[in-house]
Image (tube, rainbow, N blue to C red):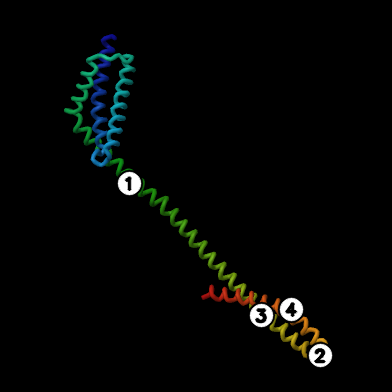
Amino acid sequence: MTLSTQFLTMLSMIGMGALFGSMLDTYQRFLHRSRRKHWLVFLNDILFWIIQALLIFYILFLINKGEIRFYIFIALVCGFAAYQSLLRGIYLRVLEVLIRSFISLYNFLKKLILLLVFKPVNGLIQLAIFTILLVGRGLISLVKFVFRVVLFIIKFILNVVKKIVLIFWKMLPKGIKKTVEKLYNRTAGNFKGIKNIINKWLEKWKKQDK
């Protein structure tokens, strides 16, 4: 390994040590250990250390084909120490500012979406439901009105026919009247059934109107 390669390896490992320190603080900031279960914290810690080890080895592989020397660990410790003493306070302040900025942006976008998308759509849905109910009630009222008109016309026609039949009945001879009475008695049961059905329907409509 040449001197230039060793120098680049040292600089990169110092940088990776500082990067490791910043990522560790970021990880601690978002983890909230006291709020999570111990087994979940344990799994997160293992994954964090595995990712950091793979990242460091990947950078080392790009620079010197993955050759490990003792000074590499010293460079990592030096980079981590430099971060802790010089950069940690600045990084944590910047991190908090970024977190607050993202939270404010998220809340703003959330309110904007609620105002421009959710509320108008919700209002349109409520208007459509109200319109459908209003039209449905209007149709039901119209059907009831038409039924009443038709029923009134039928009753009127039946009364007229009844009066006409009575007039002709009085004019018929007694022999014909007896024959008609026999036929009437035979079919009286059928007419009673039809009348009972009509009465039931009328009662139902009256109850719905109340």
**How many numbered marks are there?**
4
State the residue at coordinates (29%, 29%): 46
Q: Work out how far the residue at label 2 is from the one at label 4, CA to CA, in angstroms.
A: 20 Å
Q: Which mark is residue 187?
A: 4
Disc nearer the start of the sequence (3/2): 3
Q: Amino acid at mark 3?
A: Lys
Q: Quadrant of residue 188?
A: bottom right
Q: Is residue 4 visible?
A: yes
Q: Amino acid at mark 2?
A: Lys
| Percent of width and height locating residue 129 | 49, 60
Residue position for label 1: 107
Is label 4 in contact with label 1 (beta carbons under 8 Å)?
no
Q: Amino acid at mark 4?
A: Thr
Q: Work out how far the residue at label 1 is from the one at label 3, CA to CA, in angstroms.
A: 69 Å
Disc nearer the start of the sequence (1/3): 1
Q: Amino acid at mark 1?
A: Asn
For discs 3 and 2, the disc positioned in front in the rendered view:
2
Left or right: 101 as drawn, with respect to 78: right
Residue position for label 3: 155
- As drawn, the residue found furthest toward the top would be 2
Q: Residues within 10 Å of mark 4 (few under 14, many from 20)?
A: few
Disc nearer the start of the sequence (2/1): 1
| Percent of width and height locating residue 100 | 27, 41
Residue position for label 2: 174
For discs 1 and 3, the disc positioned in front in the rendered view:
3
Q: Residues within 10 Å of mark 2 (few under 14, many from 20)?
A: few
Q: Is residue 111 above or below residue 130?
A: above
Q: Is residue 97 visible?
A: no
Left or right: 193 as drawn, with respect to 72: right
State the residue at coordinates (29%, 9%): 1
In terms of depth relative to the viewer, which is nearer, 37 or 154?
Answer: 37
In terms of depth relative to the viewer, which is nearer, 101 or 6?
Answer: 6
